[in-house]
Image (cartoon, rainbow, N blue to C red):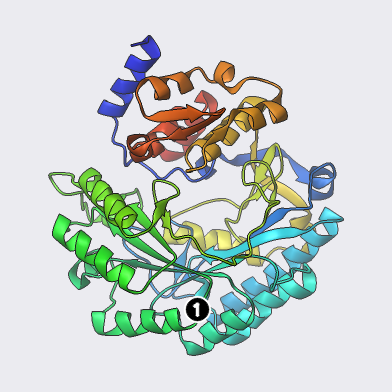
Amino acid sequence: MTEIAHTFRRYLEETNRFQSYLYSYPHKTAYRTFEEKLDLKDLWAAEKKHALYLYTHIPFCRMKCSFCNLFTVSHPKEDLINLYLKKIQLEAEVARDSLGDFNFAGYAIGGGTPSHLDINQLEQLFSVYTDTLGVDLKDTPGSFEISPDTINDEKLTFLSQHGVQRLSIGIQSFIESEARSVGRVQPETVMEPLLEKISSYQFPVFNLDLIYGIPGQTADTWLASLQKAIQFQPTEIFLYPLYVRPLTSLFKKHISIQNQDIRSTLYRLGRDFLQANGYAQDSMRLFRKQVAGLRESSEYSCQEDGMIGLGTNARSYTTDVHYSTEYAVSKSNVAAIIDDYVAKERADFTTANYGIRLSEDDRKRRYLIKSLLKAQGLDAAHYQGIYGTDVHVDFPELRTLLEMNLAQENAGRMQLQNEGMAYSDLIGHWFISPTVKQKMQEYVSK
């Protein structure tokens, strides 16, 4: 075995594989204030804009789950929500004027809890998409996140009529005691009728989120939640390991993962159960069924194409610059960032002030990480077509994955195998550049 393989094996064996969820690169904790503000018109002038992605962040929740480290605030005043939506309108107008000719190939509305908005507020938000940004909702795949305590028939009807293709709901556990242990109050007598109602609307894609590693959870209760989940025939199921992150309620209460950490066992049980029930694994967390007739964009590529973010903590991507507002978890810091956002004038939205510039090395790492951790894998020829170099020369560590049987390569495409997928977060972190790792560590140590 090579020296790199020995090093990587030690890394896998000695590192907690459930440190953090790697879903983007560079991570937002690597963002910093730019030395000079970047004009958005200049930033986007030379970018491809025919297949952009649009993300809007709604940072409001009725309650904050004890495991959540997302940028959210609970129990917001109505005046604040309405003012926030007005600023999204203003930010969208500036984005439109800065982009020139553009087209959105997909969109997502997340949070927080977008379904916390009332009908009038939802109408205001969707009018930003249609009237300001020209999004054809009937022909553009869109995703919308909901919670059990903020969704009803009126909102479901609205979302269905406005062409939302994917509805996503966080259940976390169908075992009431487990849900309560992570701050969710959702009696079974309420949940089942709600999920049946959502299913009746026949959104093309219906996603359920579940969490494994909840204190007190066992293999039997985990399988019981999975069995209950598939009864509602969701198109997608996300399986998230429980992370106890700094500044969350779980962390403050000194709640730790069970003495005998069974998350790896529960992950494999969940994976095998879903695969046996017709769900294909797309990533470590996502399992989905094939659905006929979906509106899928053949143009947008998350490795290559840009994104426009609206609202606090919504990231925007150009080829070599990622930018957003600042990130926080604690209630006071989140509230301060939102207050700063709603105080902005038009001119404040015309520049990017906070984010990160990507070197060519980090652009390559981003492409590799976002490709390798998905089922379709890393296309070496496509990589070479973009960067003009051989990915195996740029990243000799890839050979280690093959040597350890964590990945396979066929016809120039490298894909993680079953056990490779189980270690995908660690594999992703293995490829983060030293500079970005240092920035992330500096952020955590503040």
Classify the position of the C terminus by image quarter.
Answer: top left
Label 1: few (<14), some (14–19) or many (≥20) C-alpha neighbours in 10 Å: few
From the top left corner, tell me how far across and down residue 47 is, in percent: 79, 43
Camera sees residue 58: no
Q: Quadrant of residue 92?
A: bottom right
Residue 264 shown left or right of residue 91 in the figure: left
Residue at x-position 55% and y-position 19%? 392
Q: Nearer the viewer, residue 222 or 358?
A: 222
Horizontal arrangement in the rendering, residue 131 relative to residue 65 (left or right): right
The three-letter code of the residue at mark 1 reads Gln
Q: Under tag 1, what secondary structure?
A: loop
Q: How many marks?
A: 1
**Disc 1: which residue:** 202
In the rendered image, residue 74, in percent from the top left (x then y), is placed at: 43, 71
The answer to whether 323 is drawn above or below residue 278 in the figure is: above
Which quadrant would the N terminus be assigned to in this image? top left
What x and y, as percent, mark residue 192? 31, 81
- The residue closer to the viewer here, 202 or 181, is 202
- Residue 169 visible here: yes
User: Is 129 situated above or below 307?
Assistant: below
